[in-house]
Structure formats: C-alpha cells, structure tokens
C-alpha cells in the first residue's frame, strides 16, 4: 500500500527543519487562522506575508497583475490571490493535508498552518501534525459570533492551544464602529468563559485595508491594544514543558545507507536525549542505549523536543517505522482499546463498526469506532445522544485497534495522543481525534 501520510510528515519535517535552521537565533511561533468561508483568512495570511516582505519580487509582480485581472477588490492587491496561488503549487502534492507558510520578521519566525480546502479548516486544529501555540479566530464584523466561531474556539481549547486572538475583521465594512467591536467582544467573552478560555486578545482589523495589522490604524483611535503583528511577535510561548517530559521519538524511517550504519530517524516529540541514555523500543519493549545522535550538521551531545535527529543504538534490536523510542524507565503506554474525542470532518457520516485507518504519530493501524457515547453541542456545551457523527460533529466514542499502539493521553502528549482516521477506500481524512485513556492495556508489554 502506498502511504501518503508518512511521506507528507517526512517532507514537512524536512521543510520545517531547513527553515528553522536558517533563523536559529529567533524564537518560533506556530499559529493557525480559523474562521468560516470568506471571513478573510487567505487575505490576512497574504497580508502578513506581504508586510513581512517575505514574498519574492516576481511573485509580487504576478500578484499585482492577477489582482487587476481576477481580483475581487478592483485595482488593489487582493492578498487572497497570493495564498490561493500558493495553493496551486501545493496541490501538486495532493497528499498534503496541512500546508505550512513560513515567514520571518526581525523579531521572530512564524509557521502558519493553512489548509487547501475551505471546508476542511478544522483539520489543522486537531491533527497530530498541528502543534500551534496560538489561534487567530477570525470574525466578520458584519456577522458577529457564529456557531463556527464557537466550534473553532472549542477545538482550539480542546487541542491545548493556549493563546487565542479574536480578530474582528472587515472593520472597514462597519465604519470602524467601536460599538460593533465591543458588542462582539463581549458576546465572545461570555462564551469563552463557558468553555474555560480565560484569556484572549481582541483586535479590530481589516486584513484587506491593513488596519491594525503591522501598525495602529488611525481609523480606530479608540483601540488601545497592539497591532496584530506586534502581538504575534511578542506573545510568550513556553516550550520548556515538552522538554521536561520523558523522551518520545516516533520513528519516521529507518536510515540504513549501508551495512555499517543503522539509525532511526524522526522528530523528538518530547524530552531530551544524550548518547549513553537507556531507551526502550515500543511496542516490543526491547531495551538498548543511544550510541550516537546524528544530524546533517554532525553528531550532537544532546537533542531536545522539536529537533529532527537520527539515533544509533548500541545493540542490534528490532525497531521499525511506527515504533516509538522512549525513555527506558518511563515508557509510553501500549493499548488497543480507547476512549477518544472525535471530530468528524467528512460529508459521509461515521459508520460505527467499519474499519478505518488510524494514524497516530508515525503509526498506522486498522481501527473501528463504536457508536458515540454522546455528541457535544458547541453552542450550549450540552451532551446529546447520537447514533453517529455527521460533518463537523464532535463526540466522545470508544474505539478499538487491530493491534496494540503506543500512545499517551492527549493532555500529556499531543503527538502520541492525537490521531486522524482515514477512509480505506477513498484515502481521505475523515476525522481527527484525541485519545483520553485506554480501556484495555496490551498484555506482555508494561
Ligand atoms: P477566506 O475564505 O476566509 O480565506 O476569505 P478570503 O481571504 O478569501 O476573503 C473573502 C472575501 O472577503 C474576499 O473578497 C476578500 O477580498 C474580502 N475581505 C477579506 N478581508 C477583508 C477586509 O478586511 N475588508 C474587506 N472589505 N474585505 C475583505
């Protein structure tokens, strides 16, 4: 079977590595933009890319020409075209679920997750691939807080994104009205409090006109906070928590160029590793120790969460793609039955009992989901009885895998607790989810 998802992860990891190493001295912020169709996500991302001057000259010239031809905004530059133009390029690699845009300013480097299809934006927020620090929740000032806004905020909170920006967009279309802005913010505050979001920053913007994006706008003299870019540049993100956790390295591929070298490559999901450290390969439970940490720039004395490395082990033990290299004295759990929160993302509803591919970290197994225990109403937070999950529904259900998987509760480790479900026939991603706990641990493995 061809395996597009693994390849995608590997490619993304390589891209991200190349980008990160170019700007090593700057701190990183990963963020996502959420909103309904036409709220202005593409325009905002295009504007941020444009204002950070990371667009190549020739792309800009093409953009100006395209805006005149097909833009929705007269003769002015239509920033949405920029992102859509980039979309054409990424569509050549059809397998990419989540696309990443990289840009840097003098102060910081950024990765913004972006999705190819308008309907599929929730996917960003819940796949294991997405490790956003911050979510920009876009609201069209003319429409106010919608069910989508509530759903995205709920998901952002659920997946552990700690920083929320409420960007009230298209302020130019409501005459930069302070009243409208404040009514929206106050309605959002009531809702946010009810789902446990205690803190958010609200900014009145026009992605299209550029108000409060990189500089404060004279159209909103009543607004006292920072422009969006300043906030993105200065919000503090603490990644030290991931490093303090035990070592987890989901093996992406086995690197064996010749008989003398055998290394296990992947992105360190949590913890730190040094040569000499005792490790345990899961799910087999075999132990060994690290002999070398190899990277393209030479061997390392230590590597930490977020780095892509190749580990060589002191012993010739079995270890293949999908396995997890873990701290020997503090390994992950191995189980084949779970309770999970599932976000359904396909037009065709969940079929309880049917087998889907479940992708978790670098593992891929066959899994069946039972009828949900309940569905969550994102407007009221009520639990509703449900027989299945329809498009965009969020529910809690039990699932079983055909063989044991290495996992951790999502709250403790996003990489080993977040999963996606893939339809076995169409190969489309149909759901994303978070494992809460196991209902049955595998025998014979701790
Ligand atoms: P997306 O579907 O969320 O990516 O939305 P787009 O970025 O494609 O924007 C949808 C439409 O709204 C386009 O016609 C944009 O030009 C327009 N738009 C986006 N932001 C603004 C804004 O701040 N002001 C105005 N007037 N139009 C905007």
Image (spheres, grey):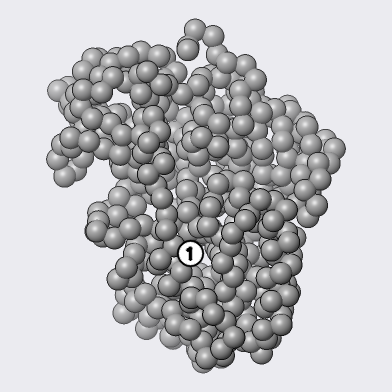
The answer, for residue 227, to whether it is visible in the render is: yes
Horizontal side of 318 relative to 85 (left or right) equals left
Q: Residue at x 34, y 62 (%)?
A: 109
Looking at the picture, how far across and down is residue 323, in whole percent? 41, 25
Work out whether 308 lies above or below 124.
Answer: above
The local secondary structure at tag 1 comes to helix
Disc 1 packing (10 Å; few <14; some 14–19; many ≥20): some
Find residue 167 and report its image quarter: bottom right
Looking at the picture, how far across and down is residue 41, in whole percent? 56, 69
Residue identifier under label 1: 87
In this rendered view, identify the residue nearer to me: 139 or 161. 161
Looking at the picture, how far across and down is residue 287, in whole percent? 32, 14
Horizontal side of 378 relative to 314 (left or right) equals right
Horizontal side of 87 relative to 398 (left or right) equals left
Find residue 366 and report its image quarter: top right
The answer, for residue 79, to whether it is visible in the render is: no
Find residue 33 and report its image quarter: bottom right
Q: Residue at x 78, y 41 (%)?
A: 375
Work out whether 395 lies above or below 445.
Answer: below
Residue most extreme to the right = 385
Looking at the picture, how far across and down is residue 368, in whole percent? 67, 27
Q: Residue at x 48, y 64 (%)?
A: 87
Q: Residue at x 35, y 23 (%)?
A: 327
Work out whether 78 lies above or below 185.
Answer: below
């Amino acid at each position: 079977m061809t395996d597009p998802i693994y390849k995608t992860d590997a490619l993304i990891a390589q891209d991200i590595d190349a980008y990160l190493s170019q700007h090593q001295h700057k701190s990183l912020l990963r963020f996502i933009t959420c909103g309904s169709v036409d709220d202005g996500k593409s325009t905002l991302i295009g504007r941020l890319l444009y204002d950070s001057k990371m667009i190549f000259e020739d792309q800009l010239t093409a953009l100006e020409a395209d805006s005149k031809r097909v833009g929705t905004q007269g003769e002015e530059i239509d920033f949405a075209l920029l992102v859509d133009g980039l979309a054409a390029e990424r569509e050549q690699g059809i397998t990419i679920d989540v696309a990443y845009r990289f840009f840097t300013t003098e102060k910081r480097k950024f990765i913004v997750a972006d999705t190819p299809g308008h309907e599929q934006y929730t996917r960003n927020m819940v796949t294991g691939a997405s490790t956003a620090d911050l979510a920009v929740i876009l609201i069209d000032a003319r429409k106010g807080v919608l069910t989508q806004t509530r759903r995205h905020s709920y998901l952002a909170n659920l997946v552990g994104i700690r920083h929320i920006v409420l960007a009230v967009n298209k302020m130019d279309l409501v005459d930069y009205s302070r009243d409208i802005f404040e009514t929206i913010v106050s309605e959002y505050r009531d809702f946010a409090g009810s789902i446990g979001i205690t803190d958010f920053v609200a900014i009145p913007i026009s992605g299209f006109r550029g108000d409060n994006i990189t500089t404060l706008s004279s159209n909103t003299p009543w607004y006292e906070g920072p422009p969006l870019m300043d906030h993105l540049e200065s919000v503090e993100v603490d990644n030290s928590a991931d490093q303090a956790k035990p070592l987890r390295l989901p093996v992406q591929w086995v690197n064996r160029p010749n008989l003398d070298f055998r290394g296990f490559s992947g992105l360190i999901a949590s913890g730190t590793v040094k040569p000499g450290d005792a490790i345990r390969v899961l799910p087999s439970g075999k132990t060994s120790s690290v002999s070398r940490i190899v990277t393209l720039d030479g061997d390392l004395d230590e590597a930490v969460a977020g780095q892509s490395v190749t580990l060589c082990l002191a012993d010739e033990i079995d270890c293949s793609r999908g396995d997890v290299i873990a701290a020997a004295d503090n390994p992950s759990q191995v189980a084949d039955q779970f309770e999970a929160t599932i976000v359904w993302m396909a037009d065709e509803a969940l079929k309880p009992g049917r087998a889907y591919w479940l992708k978790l970290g670098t593992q891929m197994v066959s899994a069946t989901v039972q009828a949900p225990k309940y569905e969550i109403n994102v407007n009221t937070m009520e639990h509703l009885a449900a027989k299945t999950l329809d498009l965009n529904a969020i529910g809690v259900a039990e699932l079983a895998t055909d063989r044991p998987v290495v996992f951790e509760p999502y709250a403790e480790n996003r990489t080993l607790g977040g999963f996606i479900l893939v339809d076995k026939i169409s190969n489309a991603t149909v759901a994303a989810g978070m494992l809460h706990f196991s209902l049955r641990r595998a025998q014979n493995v701790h």
